[in-house]
Image: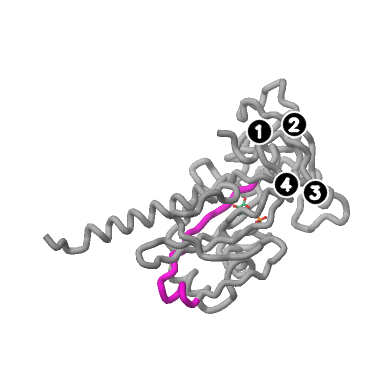
């Protein structure tokens, strides 16, 4: 099945060109459309956005991620597009658009996703937001872009408190006591991706103990990006934003395996 990055796009994007074989960059029939959002250009561009040209040597040093999720730099992971000087190619394949679209950086645009779960009566619940996008309001994990000089755990804490829960000591306890694992690090199939700018993320799972879960109070500060936050029964969630459903599936599998192990340990009646 084709990726979202070939089928969907924010409202301001031009129509994506046909990609054909998504990984054949030499295809002579491929005619992508050039598009970079106007707000990312000119003297009023935000400080976090790249200049129109970023030198090859600087690009080589930028943080990236290997296929297996290891942190590397672009020199170790990227495929360079010699025909369009200075640009690396999206590891997820063609998108029908060249330029940066609505993304600030050439190459990897780093985000952090926070997966918070709790258990009630043996059932797994996950804390999700409704994201405001031009493609409906899909469910997503609380998440956001890693700011310059920011460590990923700080991004996660900041985004969780902007998009899903009210700041409190329960948030500290969640991060300090309830971490399960980083379930994913790498390329995200995001509808904003272009051939030369794409989303990458680290998605980390925290399973709130009953005490921490009951002390987390839901609330959204960032009402422009997020419509609301709520607990959802994990197995009932269907469509999600970008690649988020793939990571939720991993968390559901973790919960099932844990329940299975707990069942094996319980003394049998017979
Ligand atoms: C996705 O975009 C990431 O997985 C993360 O959920 C999100 C970050 O972008 P913003 O929500 O900050 O726009 O690719």
Would you name the residue on which mark 3 appears?
A: 51
Q: Nearer the viewer, mark 3 or mark 1?
A: 1
Sequence-wise, the earlier of marks 3 and 2 is 2
Residue 180 position (above or below residue 8): below
Q: Is residue 80 magenta?
A: no
Would you name the residue on which mark 2 appears?
A: 32
Instruction: Measure the alpha-carbon separation of dots 3 and 2.
Output: 21 Å
Give residue 135's position: percent from left, percent from top. Answer: 68, 48
**Which residues, given as a range, are shown in magenta?**
199-215
Q: Are marks 1 and 4 in contact (CB under 8 Å)?
A: no
For disc 3, the neighbor class at 10 Å (few under 14, some 14 to 19, many from 20) is some
Give residue 34's position: percent from left, percent from top. Answer: 79, 36
Sequence-wise, the earlier of marks 4 and 2 is 4
Would you name the residue on which mark 1 appears?
A: 94
Q: Nearer the viewer, mark 4 or mark 2?
A: 4
For disc 4, the neighbor class at 10 Å (few under 14, some 14 to 19, many from 20) is some
Residue at the top extreme of this rendering:
28
Kind of element beneath mark 3: loop
Q: Is residue 210 magenta?
A: yes
Which quarter of the picture shows residue 141?
A: bottom right
Kind of element beneath mark 4: loop
* Quadrant of picture, ligand 1: bottom right
Q: Are marks 4 and 3 in contact (CB under 8 Å)?
A: no
């Amino acid at each position: 099945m084709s990726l979202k990055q070939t089928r969907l796009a924010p409202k301001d994007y031009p129509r994506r060109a046909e990609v054909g074989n998504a990984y054949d960059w030499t295809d002579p029939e491929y005619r992508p459309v050039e598009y970079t959002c106007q707000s990312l250009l000119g003297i009023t561009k935000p400080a976090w956005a790249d200049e129109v040209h970023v030198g090859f040597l600087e690009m080589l040093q930028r943080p990236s991620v290997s296929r297996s999720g290891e942190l590397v730099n672009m020199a170790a992971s990227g495929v360079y597009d010699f025909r369009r000087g200075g640009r690396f190619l999206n590891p997820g394949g063609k998108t029908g658009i060249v330029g940066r679209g609505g993304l600030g950086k050439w190459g990897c645009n780093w985000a952090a996703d926070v997966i918070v779960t709790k258990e009630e009566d043996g059932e797994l619940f996950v804390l999700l937001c409704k994201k405001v996008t031009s493609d409906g309001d899909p469910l997503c994990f609380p998440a956001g872009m890693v700011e310059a000089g920011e460590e990923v755990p700080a991004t996660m804490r900041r985004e969780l408190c902007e998009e899903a829960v009210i700041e409190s000591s329960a948030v500290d306890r969640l991060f300090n006591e309830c971490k399960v694992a980083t379930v994913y690090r790498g390329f995200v199939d995001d509808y904003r991706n272009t051939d030369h700018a794409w989303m990458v993320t680290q998605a980390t799972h925290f399973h709130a103990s009953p005490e921490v879960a009951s002390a987390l109070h839901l609330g959204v500060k960032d009402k422009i990006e997020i419509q609301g936050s709520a607990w959802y029964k994990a197995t009932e969630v269907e469509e999600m934003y970008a690649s988020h459903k793939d990571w939720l599936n991993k968390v559901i599998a973790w919960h099932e395996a844990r329940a299975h192990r707990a069942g094996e340990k319980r003394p049998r009646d017979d």
